[in-house]
Amino acid sequence: MRKKVTVVGAGNVGATTAQRIFDKGYADVVLVDIVEGLPQGKALDMLEAGPVTGSDAKIVGTNGYDETAGSDVVVITSGIARKPGMSRDDLLLTNMKIVTSVVQEVVKRSPNTIIVPVTNPLDAMAQRAFQVSKFPKNRIVGMAGVLDTARFRAFLAMELKVSVNDITAWVLGGHGDTMVPVVASTFVGGVPVSKLMSKEKLDAIVKRTQGGGAEIVNLLKTGSAYYAPSAAAVQMVESILFDKKQILPCAAYLEGEYGINGLFVGVPCKLGAKGIEQIIQFDLTAEEKAALNKSAVAVKELVEVMAKAG
């Protein structure tokens, strides 16, 4: 019997996530959105690609949640993007309401699921999903670090003209301009990256990684990234469904790890059938530790705004 994955939000990130999973054929997919006809139309279009891609999986689109019952994994991409003139708090509180509603509906029908929030501001939305679901902390896994790390690795590979597969790297912290590419633990074919390029060039790549999402938004003019975010979400889903136990950077609820307590922050996690099965701790330089703490403070500020809003 195939696994079942629900993707909430049929915009670019959600629809592309659903498509990637359906095309591989290992899980049935439910695509949920409040816009009438949108998830149904996109799901039908994907279903009709099955004979070409070789997928015998099922995919349905719906405006409700009954079809999501018994989902093994739920990926939440629904929410609004930040618009001109909108403050970070406006975005936070609007998406907080959306994520709250989605989680309430999902939990009723899939009490044993693992939730992968993708909606921004990511770390705060993972915190909200944790509060509303009342799930154990291992079953809420925020998607951000996989994406940020992929961007970092892509930029390094371009600069050094090597395969992305030869680059080992980690981006920790909150999903935003306070994220922390861990340069001291970045290796290219086993060689420390600091030995292969100048500090100036490396600093420029770190900065580009931190602004990776904004760079794409500026180029597109309307909309934001979705190919890389959906690929990142799917890598997490596959590690869970197939119990791969891959170590991936994800937003996890920390209780003392890395000196952070009571917050969702991006750290290396072993992802398996139970969700987060272990948080991996490695040594950071004093500078990296300070940057991670700064990132956690930025997340805490958002969580406090949500707490005041109720």
Image: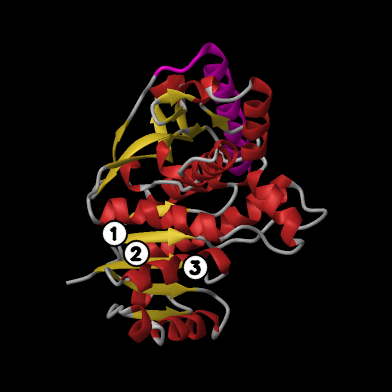
User: Which residue is labeled 1 in the image?
Assistant: 111
> x and y percent of residue 171 in the render?
50, 34
Amino acid bearing label 2: Lys
Residue placed furthest toward the front: 161
User: Which residue is labeled 2 in the image?
Assistant: 108
Q: Which residues are magenta?
A: 283-308
Distance from Cα at disc 3 to Cα at disc 1: 25 Å
> x and y percent of residue 244 in the render?
24, 48
> x and y percent of residue 92 in the render?
64, 49
Dot 2 falls on a residue whose secondary structure is helix
Question: In front here: 169 or 222?
Answer: 169
User: Which residue is labeled 3 in the image?
Assistant: 16
Q: Is residue 236 left or right of residue 8?
A: left
Q: Residue at x 27, y 80 (%)?
A: 56
Where is 231 relative to 162, above or below?
below
Where is 220 relative to 310, above or below?
below
